[in-house]
Image (spheres, rainbow, N blue to C red):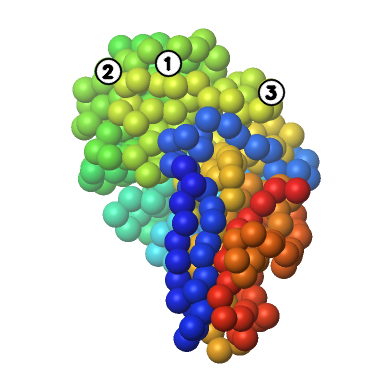
């Protein structure tokens, strides 16, 4: 829907902005791959932690971003397969494994990482932060907890199945894994088996809007409000589902062959067009955007704004500040007009950020000025 806003930028100056707005639900219809990707390694997990997106994967790969579109590779100092990310107590914790050795990486700034190598014989596969405690899970029912990410304590395993996902919400921890395994805890120390009623490989779990959602192989999706009583949903696919995330009232599941599904109630699921055939392993939400990652270092973001949105930020003594929101990688032209009939280009550019700010210094002496954004 086209919408016009008028703002008095300066005394005697009226600026009209032309743009198009779209809702999040519609934006999830189509996804776009970041090109080029900052990584060639497979990315197994992405999380929004400490006001940053962090993506981790094979060969110690770590990439960070503040907006999901501009990424910086970080030196982990490790060649481990990194599988889990969390943040708490002003500390980032990444969990993984290498040659049957558990790996923990910790950092306070994402640029410098300290390795904590745990005893062999187990893999770390996922981690979360719950009520002041880091909780990490792995193969053969491994569970460890820590308050600082440095000193870890083994907890009694109540299952011998591998645990691939863990999440915290509503005062409860839920961990999931092979053979339909679901276990719960209120403190990370004492765990109880839950009945999932499935034997499928469960790969991930997320919490949002008072509901836990679990995804797994053969299109398995389960939901629960307490972590104990579980119900199945028809996902509409038999593909493997590897990751689940939640944001702005929407669950997003990702999986094999570029599968993306969304739901606003954890029951009814809608297939989306990812635009790729890569296996997608992780999904996260932050700063108003979803980001998915997967095989070959692919990083996907939804087409949050299929057409540009133009908004006024502020008038200043040296000009009028505008924000243009548009698709990353798309070309736009910012134009102005004194009368809505004659339009002149102010700027032509290719979008590299979801939100791009521009200061029109030539507007300070204009009696009236209108703005619009067009595509070449």
Image point 60% across, 61% down: which residue? 340
- Which circle's residue, 1 or 3, is located before the other in the chain? 1
Residue at image position (70%, 48%) is: 375
Label 1 crowd bin: few (<14), some (14–19), many (20+), radius 10 Å: many
Q: CA distance from mark 2 to mark 1?
A: 12 Å
**Marked residue nearer the N-terminal end (3 or 2):** 2
Rendering coords of residue 332 (x, y %): 70, 53
Instruction: Please name whichever residue, 310 or 67, is drawn nearer the observer in this view of the structure.
Output: 310
**Residue 318 in sight from this viewpoint:** yes
Other-residue count near label 3 (Cα within 10 Å), few / some / many at <14 / 14–19 / ≥20:
few
Nearer the viewer's eye, disc 2 or disc 1?
1
Distance from disc 3 to disc 2, alpha carbons, whole Å, reads 29 Å
Q: Which residue in the structure is indicated by mark 2?
A: 231
Q: Which residue is mark 1?
A: 235
x 49%, y 74%: residue? 14
Question: For residue 123, which quarter of the picture?
Answer: top right
- Among the 4 quarters of the image, the one containing residue 291: top right
């Amino acid at each position: 829907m086209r919408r016009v806003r008028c703002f008095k930028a300066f005394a005697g100056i009226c600026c009209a902005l032309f743009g198009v707005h779209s809702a999040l639900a519609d934006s999830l219809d189509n996804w776009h791959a970041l090109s080029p990707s900052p990584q060639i390694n497979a990315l197994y997990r992405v999380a929004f932690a400490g006001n940053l997106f962090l993506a981790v994967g094979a060969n110690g790969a770590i990439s960070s971003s503040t907006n999901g579109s501009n990424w910086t590779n970080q030196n982990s100092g490790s060649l481990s397969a990194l599988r889990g990310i969390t943040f708490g107590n002003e500390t980032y914790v990444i969990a993984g494994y290498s040659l049957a050795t558990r790996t923990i990486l910790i950092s306070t700034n994402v640029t410098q990482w300290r390795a904590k190598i745990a005893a062999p014989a187990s893999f770390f596969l996922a981690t979360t932060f719950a009520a002041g405690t880091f909780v990490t899970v792995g193969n053969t029912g491994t569970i460890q907890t820590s308050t600082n990410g440095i000193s870890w304590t083994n907890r009694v395993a109540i299952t011998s199945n591998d645990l691939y996902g863990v999440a915290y919400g509503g005062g409860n921890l839920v961990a999931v894994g092979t053979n339909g395994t679901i276990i719960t805890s209120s403190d990370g120390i004492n765990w109880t088996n839950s009945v999932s009623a499935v034997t499928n490989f469960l790969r991930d779990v997320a919490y949002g809007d008072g509901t836990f959602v679990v995804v797994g192989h053969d299109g398995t999706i389960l939901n629960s409000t307490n972590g104990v009583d579980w119900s199945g949903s028809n996902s509409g696919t038999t593909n493997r589902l590897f990751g689940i995330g939640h944001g702005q009232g929407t669950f997003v599941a990702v999986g094999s062959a570029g599968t993306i599904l969304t739901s606003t109630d954890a029951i009814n699921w809608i297939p989306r067009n990812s635009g790729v055939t890569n296996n997608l392993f992780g999904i996260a939400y932050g700063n108003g955007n979803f980001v998915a990652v997967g095989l070959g270092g692919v990083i996907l973001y939804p087409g949050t704004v299929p057409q540009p949105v133009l908004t006024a930020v502020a008038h200043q003594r040296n000009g009028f500040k505008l924000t243009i929101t548009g698709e990353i990688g798309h070309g736009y032209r910012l134009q102005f007009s004194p009368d809505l009939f004659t339009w002149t280009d102010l700027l032509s550019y290719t979008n590299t950020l979801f939100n791009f700010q521009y200061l029109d210094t030539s507007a300070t002496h204009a009696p009236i000025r209108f703005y619009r954004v067009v595509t070449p």
